[in-house]
Amino acid sequence: DAGVIQSPRHEVTEMGQEVTLRCKPISGHDYLFWYRQTMMRGLELLIYFNNNVPIDDSGMPEDRFSAKMPNASFSTLKIQPSEPRDSAVYFCASSHGDRGPPPTFGQGTRLTVV
Amino acid sequence: AQKITQTQPGMFVQEKEAVTLDCTYDTSDPSYGLFWYKQPSSGEMIFLIYQGSYDQQNATEGRYSLNFQKARKSANLVISASQLGDSAMYFCAMRGVNTGGFKTIFGAGTRLFVKA
């Protein structure tokens, strides 16, 4: 398996633009997590899905952030409009089962909003 | 609510010596899992070791062992015979029950520096 695949790896955008981050989980994994990593706040769980259904989005910072999982093999995290404080590394991770192996992380997307 | 605490922002260890990275947690779930991840400067998250709350024995994986003290709610990572390549950020994480599913949260991390 190719692992969790995120795209793009790097994104530079101007303030006010829409940004879409993409994630392909490992085939067969039923949990998908979106995390944001910054120096100030560490690794924050933004939202997670189980069987394509959002379970907990309490970590989503504000209405500018939205996430979808239209099928088992694809998820997006969208920021509209983007702001400089959204600059961070965004990780997608997936795992299988309630008590299975721990989440496997993608390589992350480094987002810079100027 | 679940919480993970790593109180050591940075640690130094001499090459070939052992080092313990602290992690305490708080949860009311009867069943949970504890993990450690390593994040080198390249940025990827690498899973190291797992401990289930009902496991009788402490987990070990090569040079990594997890000192699990359930009553004290601590899950410290012990790295034996440190190597220069162990210099990285280390995160403690916990997976517990959340309404409708299992949620994994992370501590703030400890940056480990291995000195030659």
Image: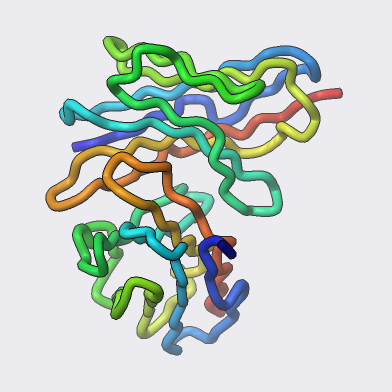
Image side of residue B46 versus residue B3, left or right: right
Quarter of the figure that contains the C terminus of chain A? bottom right
Q: Nearer the viewer, residue A100 or B70?
A: A100
Q: Nearer the viewer, residue A44 or B65?
A: B65
Kindly indicate the quadrant of the structure image that contains residue B96: top left
User: From what the image shows, is residue A4 above or below residue A21?
Assistant: above
User: From what the image shows, is residue B96 above or below residue B116?
Assistant: below
User: From what the image shows, is residue A50 above or below residue A101?
Assistant: below
Q: Nearer the viewer, residue A86 or B115?
A: B115
Residue occupying image coordinates x 74% and y 13%: B17
Q: Position of residue B78 (x, y in %)?
A: 57, 18
Residue occupying image coordinates x 31% and y 18%: B73
Given the current orientation, which residue lies at the most extreme right position?
A: B116
User: From what the image shows, is residue A36 above or below residue B84?
Assistant: below
Q: Position of residue A20 (x, y in %)?
A: 44, 82
Kindly indicate the quadrant of the structure image that contains residue A2: bottom right
Residue occupying image coordinates x 27% and y 10%: B71
How many marks can you see? 0
Q: Nearer the viewer, residue A84 or B22?
A: B22
Q: Position of residue A106 (x, y in %)?
A: 53, 60
* Residue A73 in view here: yes
Given the current orientation, which residue lies at the most extreme left position?
A: B99
Image side of residue B11 versus residue B97, left or right: right
Quarter of the figure that contains the N terminus of chain A? bottom right
Kindly indicate the quadrant of the structure image that contains residue A46: bottom left
* Residue A65 in view here: no
Residue occupying image coordinates x 20% and y 50%: B101
